[in-house]
């Protein structure tokens, strides 16, 4: 259930969990870099192919920020996402989650939705979605 929706950017860009795609497009890291987004726990979802273009630079960018790089298109992806949200320590009852869908495939987005739904059963989530046009 959506309780509130706005087109305004969040006032605070410090999140408990940030989920991004790690692919060949440079824009994989644009939102995180341009807005100085910080995360207690970061997940970088890989395609498992398309390791060309800006892939190496994207992977390095997120690894330097301690993001866990995982498959974004695996049957285990939703559980990895749910686990990340469940385990992050917060000062609030709601975990603040940012999902940058800029370079995600439909399968990745579906896995994120399933993972967040699983986590939501155990704790509240405040969700922010970001998108950088190509």
Image: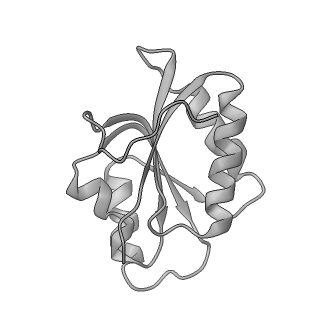
> Which corner quadrant holds the N terminus?
top right
Query: Going by the image, does 61 lie left or right of 69?
Result: left
Query: Going by the image, does 22 lie left or right of 116?
Result: left
> Which corner quadrant holds the C terminus?
bottom left
Query: Going by the image, does 29 lie left or right of 55?
Result: left
Quadrant position of residue 123? top right
Residue 118 visible in the shown view: yes
- Please, is residue 126 above or below residue 94 in the view? below
Residue 72 visible in the shown view: no
Picture coordinates of residue 95 (x, y %)? 49, 27
- Please, is residue 96 above or below residue 114 in the view? above
Picture coordinates of residue 50 (x, y %)? 54, 82
Identified at 41% across, 14% down, the residue is 91
Picture coordinates of residue 39 (x, y %)? 36, 39
Of all residues shown, which one is farthest toward the right?
Answer: 75
Q: How is the image coloured?
A: one colour
- Please, is residue 118 above or below residue 27 in the view? above
Identified at 47% across, 66% down, the residue is 22
Identified at 64% across, 68% down, the residue is 106
Q: Nearer the viewer, residue 23 or 121?
A: 121
Picture coordinates of residue 65 (x, y %)? 32, 49
């Amino acid at each position: 259930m959506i309780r509130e929706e706005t087109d305004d950017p969040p006032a605070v860009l410090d999140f408990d969990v940030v989920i991004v795609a790690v692919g060949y497009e440079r824009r994989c890291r644009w939102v995180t870099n341009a807005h100085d987004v910080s995360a207690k726990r970061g997940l970088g979802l890989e395609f498992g192919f398309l390791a060309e273009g800006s892939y190496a630079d994207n992977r390095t960018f997120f690894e330097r920020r301690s993001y866990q790089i995982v498959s974004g298109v695996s049957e285990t992806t939703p559980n990895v996402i749910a686990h990340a949200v469940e385990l992050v320590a917060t000062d609030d009852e709601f975990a603040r989650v940012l999902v940058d869908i800029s370079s995600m495939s439909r399968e990745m987005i579906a896995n994120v939705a399933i993972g967040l739904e699983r986590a939501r059963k155990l704790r509240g989530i405040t969700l922010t979605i970001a998108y950088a046009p190509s």
